[in-house]
Amino acid sequence: MKIALITGITGQDGSYLAELLLEKGYMVHGVKRRASSFNTQRIDHIYQDQHEAHVNFKLHYGDLTDSTNVIRIIQEVQPDEIYNLGAMSHVKVSFDSPEYVANVDGIGTLRILEAVRILGLEKKTRIYQASTSELYGGLAENKNEKGFYDENSPFYPRSPYGVAKIYGFWITKNYREAYNMYACNGILFNHESPRRGETFVTRKITMATAAIALGEQDCLYLGNLDAQRDWGHAKDYVEAMWRILQQDTAEDYVIAMGETTYVRDFVKMSFAEVGIDIEFKGEGVNEKGFVASCSNPAYQIEIGKQVIAVDPQYFRPTEVDLLIGDPTKSKTKLGWVPKYDLGGLVKEMMVSDLQYVQKEKMLKEVRSTIKY
Ligand code: NDP
Ligand code: GDR
């Protein structure tokens, strides 16, 4: 039985990867942070009770800022594969806590690599590092001749998050070259799902679309509607992570869909799922989205109502305007074929968030009738 260790197991990707590896027969260990309230919602369905079933799944308290626990956990687990997904992953928030992000996202990667070396596991343990399209920074002149970012495109990070991740990228590559370790970077473009954190733009949009359609929210405030992202489904992307560690030689790979979409158009796609057509008017901070039509009689939404507004508090000091990745290498070398397209992703997120908002609405109604 192969043994895997996942940092960031409580996050979006960690939860899907744990499911995938368990399906493949792995013993899965995960690192979770101690928090003052529960933080295991995404994996609770796997981790019911450590005293009962799922002996193939074990969680360890730990933090990437603490090399003593990184070493101890790796020593205890003796993993065949480590997936280093733990990170402060919000680009905008990284401007507020840059030193912390450098410590977790940058030096945290070094702590994993060094622990493997200190423990003499270089020949046994394969390491996946969660690198990111944020490394490219969206500079137009750095795209390849086909107009995409690929494994050879130069980097120009535009946030403390991107800068910290560039350290993670290079230290992974350096340890591979210096110590002949099987350590790889997956340069993943944006990937989303119903489990996406609520403050990332796609999930913020699908949750708000559901809340607006169900009369629970009036308006959705967003930042830069002109940003373009290459969005895929997290389930497909964790499959690529696994494939990266199953090759004969350790290499870095771009994982992307090869298509880019405006934030504004993601909004239109989400609302279209509930039969609402959104029309945008104005420009920049004055741009607003209005309900042009509603074909679903279940949603009592007024035609002409303003449901989208731009709030500059969501702008970033430096922005990545456009990302589009070239998945040629991952498709040919890894045989990676995504099962979802953007339409399927939006549909799944909307179905899930409609259920979620509906449930919250019902609970609110029930609570309002209870006399304490
Ligand atoms: P999430 O934000 O959903 O999850 C991040 C995980 O890291 C959580 O489990 C979080 O724990 C954990 N974490 C945060 N800080 C620490 C720390 N100090 N020590 C240990 N663990 C920590 O991110 P995703 O699942 O979306 O992304 C996974 C990885 O992939 C991240 O490294 C991200 O930067 C990278 N990435 C993501 C992309 C995407 O589009 N999703 C694209 C490219 C790269 P807790 O739950 O306690 O907060
Ligand atoms: P990103 O994702 O920064 O690409 O990083 P995010 O969803 O936060 O932003 C995407 C784009 O949308 C614009 N935007 C907004 N973003 C947020 N969060 N909230 C808003 O209200 C809003 N309005 C517009 C942003 O300016 C940006 O251009 C994600 C993370 O998962 C990283 O960890 C990962 O490395 C990269 O994807 C690839």
Image (tube, rainbow, N blue to C red):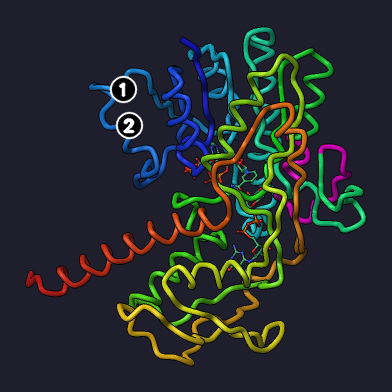
CB at disc 2 and ligand 1 closer than 8 Å: no
CB at disc 1 and ligand 1 closer than 8 Å: no
Residue 261: x %, y % from top left: 67, 62
In this view of the protein, which residue sits in the foreground, 147 or 207? Answer: 147
- Residue 232 drawn above or below residue 202: above
Q: Secondary structure at mark 2?
A: loop
- Residue 153 drawn above or below residue 21: below
User: Are the residues at dot 1 and dot 2 in contact (C-beta closer than 8 Å)?
Assistant: yes
In this view of the protein, which residue sits in the foreground, 348 or 140? Answer: 348
At label 1, counting other C-alpha atoms closer than 10 Å, the crowd grade (few under 14, some 14-19, many 20 or more) is: some
In this view of the protein, which residue sits in the foreground, 354 or 66? Answer: 354
Q: Secondary structure at mark 1?
A: loop
Residue at x 48%, y 35% (from the top left corner):
9
The span shown in magenta is 151-168
Tell me: 197 left or right of 372: right
Residue at x 58%, y 84% (from the top left corner):
279
What amino acid is found at the position of numbered circle 1 in the picture? His
Q: Which numbered dot is residue 129?
A: none
Residue 246: x %, y % from top left: 63, 19
Extreme residue in the left direction: 371
Tell which circle, 1 or 2, labels the residue nearer the N-terminal end: 2
At label 2, counting other C-alpha atoms closer than 10 Å, the crowd grade (few under 14, some 14-19, many 20 or more) is: some
Q: Which numbered dot is residue 47?
A: 2
| Distance between the alpha carbons at the discs numbered 1 and 2 | 7 Å
Whether residue 163 appears in magenta in the rendering, the answer is: yes
Whether residue 46 appears in magenta in the rendering, the answer is: no
Q: Which numbered dot is residue 54?
A: 1
What amino acid is found at the position of numbered circle 2 in the picture? Tyr
